[in-house]
Amino acid sequence: MSTTADNSYQANAALPVESFSGVVERITYHSDESGYTVARVKIPRAHELVTVVGNFANIQAGQTLQLTGNWRNHPQYGEQFQTVRYTETKPATITGIEKYLGSGLIKGLGPVMAKRIVARFGTQTLDIIENQIERLVEVNGIGKKRVSQIAKAWAEQKVIKEVMIFLQGHGVSTTYAVKIFKQYGEKAIAVVTENPYQLATDIYGIGFLTADKIAQNLGVLPSSPDRYLSGILHVLSQAAEDGHCFLPQPELVNAAVELLTNVEHQAQPEGVLAVIDRMRSEQQLMVEMAGTMPLCYQPSFYWTEQNLAQLIWQQTASEITVDRERVRNWIERFTASRGIQLSEPQRQAVELAASAKVMILTGGPGTGKTFALHTIVALWKAMGKEIALAAPTGRAAQRLGEMTGIEAKTIHRLLEFDPSTMGFKRQGDNLLSQNAFVVDEASMLDLFLAHSLLKAIPPQAQLLLVGDVDQLPSVGPGNVLKDAIDSQQIPVVRLTQVFRQAQSSAIIRSAHQINQGQYPHLEPISNAPKSDCLWHSGGETPEHGVQAIGDAIANLIPQLGFDPASDVQVLCPMTRGAVGTRNLNQVLQQLINPPSPAKAEIARGGTILRVGDRIIQLKNDYDREVFNGDLGIIAAIDSEEQEVMVRFDDRDVTYDYADLNEIALAWAVTTHKSQGSEYPVVILPMYMQHYLMLSRNLLYTGLTRAKKLAIIVGSKKAIALAIKQQQQTQRYTRLSERLAIANINFLK
């Protein structure tokens, strides 16, 4: 088998082409994304290892390769062999076979076991594995179960390698070859050949651009209707990642034309519109008129938004009759027994909760949401209600439980997700049994999670949504809490008064000043701070900001009694740039969790994951019951089993190497990903480098994640710009309008 390299430094056709055979001794660098590799190779009659660079599919130490290319002198790294083409041959020596088998190529087979196998079968080892694998039971420590595991992994590797070579031969990276095999098995090449755009639909991480690259190499015409269809779906999917439930048709057409145009083909709006009409007729796209403007939905978004509005109104169809005087008397006794007075809005919230089928309690930090909620739960208990508490994230659920003294669950666990059906068990004829529900951090509810929740609640039950509507909206599509409030169809109590005890916190004072459009009074950073909200100028450039953040974590944070490894979270507006999450994670990993012989690590796509690293889950993984935004710590890396174990709160979750694109380093995360979480210390870099993302609710959300200390690092200009950007980026949703329409239909 062979493949053509696609290298950063192209082989020079003017130089003489050479070929030689060598054994890979170690991998210096390998990018899963591009396949670009730097390896040290032992070749015959050479006293030292040579450096080989090129694009390789699934390269492992111990492989014997026939390499073709030419020598070049890299200005920084010296002499290298630039590989144009390579073929793999079976290693011939005992040492080579040992290294090959023990390299991690075969799951379940590590260096120790490889040494035993080769000691038994010598140079015939690979032939034995290929043709008489049952003989491995002759090796001490290998039973039939392990033989079966090795046989399966060996067979998979052969197919995976074929898939990798096929994809590489058609211009795609090797990153997702294992996932493609997992999805399609031995049919992988056939599926990709028949419709490469299917990859964008079926496999997480493979988008339109990757599928389009494969399609072009397979000869699919740029004007192909399948290409246009996939491009339109890609534009809508990208819009969903930005929180939109639909796109106005002109925006969709313009974005699709831009996406589909390349050097070989100028896409035309008429062509896109023709495919939209076809998709509409085949119900692959829903188009709804808002006046004269056509709005384009993916079908699941359209029906979910429609149904959610209907479910909310069905929930309010019946009324709960209560003795209001009796409720007021209970409130008097409850507050008097605790020596606490409710503000008028708090009292209003508690009284309303006695009878409202659906209501919203919103307010910023320090406004008494916690005590109002605690009182509502106590009232519901006194009324004999069976109560369920839930929140979108594990940490938010834990806080809710501590606040109320009742067990709280994540919404996913409350609804009992079933991996076998990829749906929630609690719906239809299997509704939840409780009759009063509290959902905290409701600003995080996206369209689909809110819909699943409402489908599971009994018609006679009450629902209280609690959240801060001034925070960033959900990571997923929709803007449920804001839309519900804006609809003016659901009772809302908004708490605005900051209580005296909360006013002592500079974090809370600054957050409210920011929310009111005022520049906050921030204490300059020092070694003896007097408040819990500090500002560090961080120099004029983002690069100075990186240094300032590092200095604060290395020096000030420990001096103030905090642990950098467990107490500090850096929250960034964006992933890119010097003060974006990508760069800061590399810097902070080196600072907080540096390499050590005692810590196993693995390189993936230019990033190192190491035992002790904080990581974040990037997608909902219902099989593992970990969800987008969950934080964990890498507890172990098993190179033999090719698994990484991550500890999320009180449980351990195992990832195959092939699934590591689901997690990323989380010493720094985006502010959006921090919703629902609180941290002892928060550091917020604010620089004009991220001016596109700076907004009032982003700064407000980041600041209110800090429990004990917040440090804003950056320029006054960037902070002022964020405060000025009051309007939230518009999200295309119609839940607010649908709630009003549902009300009209209900009244009819």
Image (tube, grey):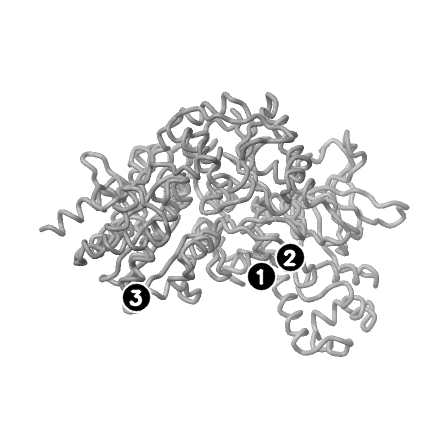
Q: Are dots 1 and 3 in contact, CB under 8 Å? A: no
Quarter occupied by residue 75: top right
Residue 374, compared with residue 75, is above or below; it is below
Q: Are dots 1 and 2 in contact, CB under 8 Å? A: yes
409 horizontally vs 286: left or right: right
Q: Which residue is mark 1?
A: 652
Q: Mark 3 vs mark 2: which is more N-terminal?
A: 3
Disc 3 residue crowd, few under 14, some 14–19, many 20+, Cα 10 Å:
some
Image position, residue 459 (x, y; %): 23, 61
Using the image, tell me which numbered label, if any, was put on residue 635: 2
Residue 8, compared with residue 87, is above or below; it is above
Residue 638, compared with residue 569, is above or below; it is below
Disc 1 residue crowd, few under 14, some 14–19, many 20+, Cα 10 Å:
some
Quarter occupied by residue 683: top right
Q: Rounded to the nearest whole Å, what is the CA distance between mark 1 and mark 2?
A: 8 Å
Using the image, tell me which numbered label, if any, was put on residue 431: 3
Residue type marked 3: Leu
Q: Are dots 3 and 2 in contact, CB under 8 Å? A: no
Q: Is residue 292 visible?
A: yes
Using the image, tell me which numbered label, if any, was put on residue 58: none
Quarter occupied by residue 583: top right
Q: Is residue 203 visible?
A: no
Q: Rounded to the nearest whole Å, what is the CA distance between mark 3 and mark 2?
A: 37 Å
